[in-house]
Image: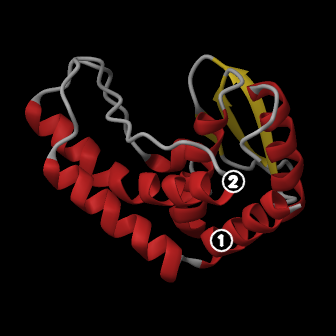
Amino acid sequence: MNDYNNDDALCFMLINLVSKVFPDLTIKGGAEEPFYKAPRGNTNAIIYFRNNYPRSLLHELSHYCLAGKKRRQIDDFGYWYTECGRTIAEQKSFELVEARPQGLEKAMCKAIGLKFVPSLDDFSGKPPSKDFLYHLDVAYHEMLTNPPPLARKLLIALKSFSEN
């Protein structure tokens, strides 16, 4: 899959795949910031991802797959977000909650042949901490060997899709 002409084409293909795997989830690109809108009444949940960026889509899908039923009923899964310029403690908290979703994101990237780079969501230029990289790697191996049900379902679809 990594030989597609552009990110728009890849995003289009991924959105089509996800709509088959998770028919109660709507995916919309072009957002300035990623956001998960929980389902209301008879409407689907909506994942908004950044621009036409496939990694943003995969990252938001990883949160969806790991959130659990209760969190999927809350906008943005009930997570908090602190803008760049975080304190050291805030950055450590961010890394704690991001290691597992990024481990799944890495497994999804591998399934479709897309390069994965850890994201600290911090533009200070600081490298990822060893703890963060360790926990991300542990989560990645979990996703390859024993992923939760929704993650397993999506990983299987991505692998079979990339083989076609």
What's the residue at 41%, 72% (across, down)?
A: 141
Quadrant for the C terminus, please: bottom right
Residue 146 in view (yes/no): no
Q: Which residue is mark 2?
A: 112
Q: Is residue 139 above or below residue 61?
A: below
Query: Where, by quadrant of the figure, is residue 35 drawn?
Result: top right
The extreme left residue here reads 88
Residue 5 in view (yes/no): yes
Q: Three-letter amino acid code at disc 2?
A: Ile
What's the residue at 63%, 51% (across, down)?
A: 61
Nearest-to-viewer mark from 1 and 2: 2
| Viewer-closest of 64 and 120 | 120
Tag 2's secondary structure?
A: helix
Q: Is residue 5 above or below residue 131?
A: above
Tag 1's secondary structure?
A: helix
Q: Three-letter amino acid code at disc 1?
A: Leu
Q: Is residue 148 left or right of residue 99?
A: right
Q: Which residue is mark 1?
A: 150
Q: Earlier in the sequence, mark 1 or mark 2?
A: 2
What's the residue at 65%, 28% (across, down)?
A: 53
Residue 3: which numbered mark, if any? Answer: none
Please name the colour scheme applied to the rendered image.
secondary structure
Q: CA distance from mark 1 to mark 2?
A: 17 Å
Q: Is residue 7 left or right of residue 126?
A: right
| Viewer-closest of 15 and 71 | 15
| Viewer-closest of 68 and 20 | 20
The extreme bottom residue here reads 146
Give the total of numbered labels.
2
Mark 2 crowdedness (10 Å alpha carbons): few <14, some 14-19, many ≥20:
some
What's the residue at 30%, 18% (across, down)?
A: 123
* CB-based contact (under 8 Å), mark 1 and mark 2: no
Q: Position of residue 115 (x, y in %)?
A: 54, 42
